[in-house]
Amino acid sequence: MLPPMTDRPNDSFETAARARGYRCVAGVDEVGRGPLCGPVVAAAVHVPDLGSLPAGVNDSKKLRPDARQALCAQIRRIAVVGIGEASVEEIDGINILAASQLAMSRAVAALPLVPDHLLIDGNRLPADLADRAEAVVKGDERSLSIAAASIVAKVWRDRIMVDLAQQYPGYGWERNAGYPTKDHLAALQNLGVTPHHRRSFRPVHHILYQAEIVNP
């Protein structure tokens, strides 16, 4: 029987995995599927003692930026963490879903230990992890390990976008993290496409197509 849906993430999936004999369980989540630019980032997180997690661990999308950063620092002090990325070139080359799964696989490979069971957010599993993983729909809202991974991945990617914003000012990446906000879309029209934009994404592709028509 699957653990029930709850208002906040808890340790029911991890407890069920341990009851089946697994000893090292890690949560995996990715961020950055929706933005128009930047890499997709995944984190794999094993928390030896889930009871030591700070209060407030939740789906990263439900947390304020300052809360995410504070929780991330606390998580990284008590957990084993692996980070994986897939580049803009890989996203454009193999599509965003495949790139997200590639980032997840890289995050698991980056762990300094080998988990015997993985809890992966979503309804699909990377093929190379499927034999030791289970998909958890809305896992960042249900599993503490996945929620912790969502926080770590989000903070990591946001820092990347802040750094890129300094190199390419005007797009608001320090605020919008590359998502297609009104200011980002306006900057795309006014400033053009950068090397960090995903050319396979419709708004970026459309601007490039318009430029080809104007300047054949």
Image (cartoon, grey):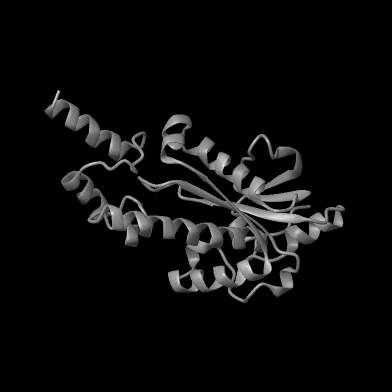
The residue that appears at 56% across and 58% down in the rendered structure is 150
Viewed as shown, does residue 206 lie left or right of 105?
left
Does any portion of residue 114 appear in the rendered image?
yes
Q: Quadrant of residue 169?
A: bottom left
Residue 2 location, x and y as percent?
74, 53
What residue occupies the far bottom of the structure in this picture? 55
Q: Is residue 140 above or below residue 206?
A: below
What residue occupies the far left of the structure in this picture? 214
Quadrant of the rendering where the C terminus is positioned:
top left
Q: Is residue 188 above or below residue 79?
A: above
Q: Is residue 51 above or below residue 158?
A: below
The residue that appears at 80% across and 55% down in the rendered structure is 17
Residue 137 location, x and y as percent?
62, 50
The residue that appears at 47% across and 38% down in the rendered structure is 96
Viewed as shown, does residue 207 lie left or right of 93?
left
Q: Total label count?
A: 0
The residue that appears at 49% across and 66% down in the rendered structure is 62
Q: Is residue 165 above or below residue 37?
A: below
Residue 6 location, x and y as percent?
64, 64
Residue 121 location, x and y as percent?
61, 50
What residue occupies the far top of the structure in this picture? 216
Does any portion of residue 123 appear in the rendered image?
no
Q: Nearer the viewer, residue 69 or 21?
A: 69
Q: Nearer the viewer, residue 135 or 175?
A: 175
Viewed as shown, does residue 29 lie left or right of 216?
right
